[in-house]
Image (cartoon, helix red, strand yellow):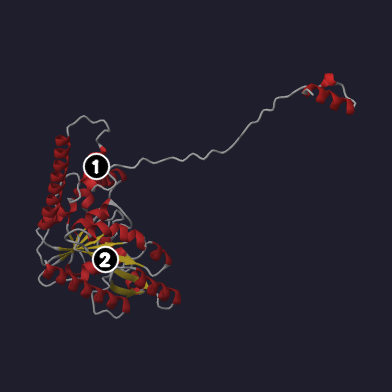
Amino acid sequence: MHRSDDIANLFNRLGASVGAYQEIEPQYDYNEDVAVVAHRPVSASANVPAPAAEALATTEPNDSRPLSRLLRELEQQREREAQDSHTLDAGRAALKAKVIALVSTQGGVGKSTLAGALGSALKRMGGTTLAVDLSPQNALCLHLGGGEQWPGLAQAYPHDRDPRQLLREGYGGSQCLAFGAASEPQRLAFEQQLAEDPLWLGRQLAALDLSEHDTVIIDTPPGASVYLAQALEIADVAVVVTHADAAAYAALDQMDRLLAPYRQRPDAVQCGVVVNQLDTSRQFSLDMFAVLKTRTSLPLLGVIHQDHFLGESLAYDRNPLAHTPSTRGCQDTLDLIESLCHLLTLGTQES
């Protein structure tokens, strides 16, 4: 029996006419989501040291240069980097004074207030103390009895002004090198200069003929910046100023990353933490302080308890450490100064 007979019998049973029969070819529209896997090409320099990797990155796959030439270019790259490193080392050696950089990842932790206190009271045997404001906020001079009209580093560039002309006397016989009032274009140009010349600040300070008994305190803006890089490039000690709060805990990893390159170099920067404005009346502050101590890998250099006398000194134009301190925060600051002087002495003995 043919297929047409089967169809005719079926239509007769249903009472329909065979002539109405039509064959329809089915059409299917498949909308399948095809997973496309993007294969990232594996870099040939994945396991090659950074300098060599950079040189190899400029090599085309079909590069016709002979192997001997490629190897010479890698060797020249290493020589250039060694020369740059030697230049940096020579620049650091030209600055004989000990340098303490105050750093933080957060604003509002009292870093400028602390820098002013250290500048006015930290004295090493036979030396003077220079407080340097490397923050565009230009606030350090206020904590040392000066004013925003003091000229500063922003005015030294681009005229190569003698930095000795910019020095002003601050509290406690200290010297202050302010940042100076700068317009937005001036600030941007200054930052570009600092980015291109990592030892600009080091040369300015070396021109002051500071001795090995002198101490430089540098105030920096919070977070990563060209100012922080300039300070850490010449620092002997980096003091991480923080609060005992949740924000400080969240910022610990960021500070570790910022300090890592300077802690790993041959003349490693010594680093430590200062917990500022600790409020012992709040259990949460005490708990956060306990957590911070166990969380950070850096040694604790000091704790400065919350002290309104310190915070109000700026409003009254007074040096909080001018007389024998009667408040706990002032005594904490003097204890920190003693710890820092001891740390600098150890660094001198090791070198």
Q: Nearer the viewer, mark 1 or mark 2?
A: 1
Residue nearest the observer in this picture, 246 or 268: 268
140 shown above or below 56: below
Residue farthest top in this picture: 19
Does dot 2 land on a helix, a strand or a loop? strand
Measured as percent of width and height from the top left, residue 271 is found at: 25, 66
Q: CA distance from mark 1 to mark 2?
A: 34 Å
Q: Quadrant of residue 177?
A: bottom left
Q: Residue at x 26, y 39 (%)?
A: 57
Q: Quadrant of residue 106?
A: bottom left
Task: Report which residue position mark 1 lands on.
Answer: 54
Left/right placement of residue 332 relative to residue 123 reads right
Task: Report which residue position mark 2 lands on.
Answer: 239
Q: Of label 1 and label 2, which has the lower sequence position?
A: 1
Does dot 1 land on a helix, a strand or a loop? helix
Left/right placement of residue 36 relative to residue 220 reads right
Quarter placement of the C terminus? bottom left
Measured as percent of width and height from the top left, residue 292 is found at: 37, 70
Inspect the image, locate mark 1, and give the three-letter code of the amino acid beneath it: Glu
Measured as percent of width and height from the top left, residue 14 is found at: 88, 28
Inspect the image, locate mark 2, and give the three-letter code of the amino acid beneath it: Val
Residue nearest the observer in this picture, 55 or 325: 55
Left/right placement of residue 107 relative to residue 272 reads right
Disc 2 crowd, CA 10 A, few/some/many (<14, 14-19, 20+):
many
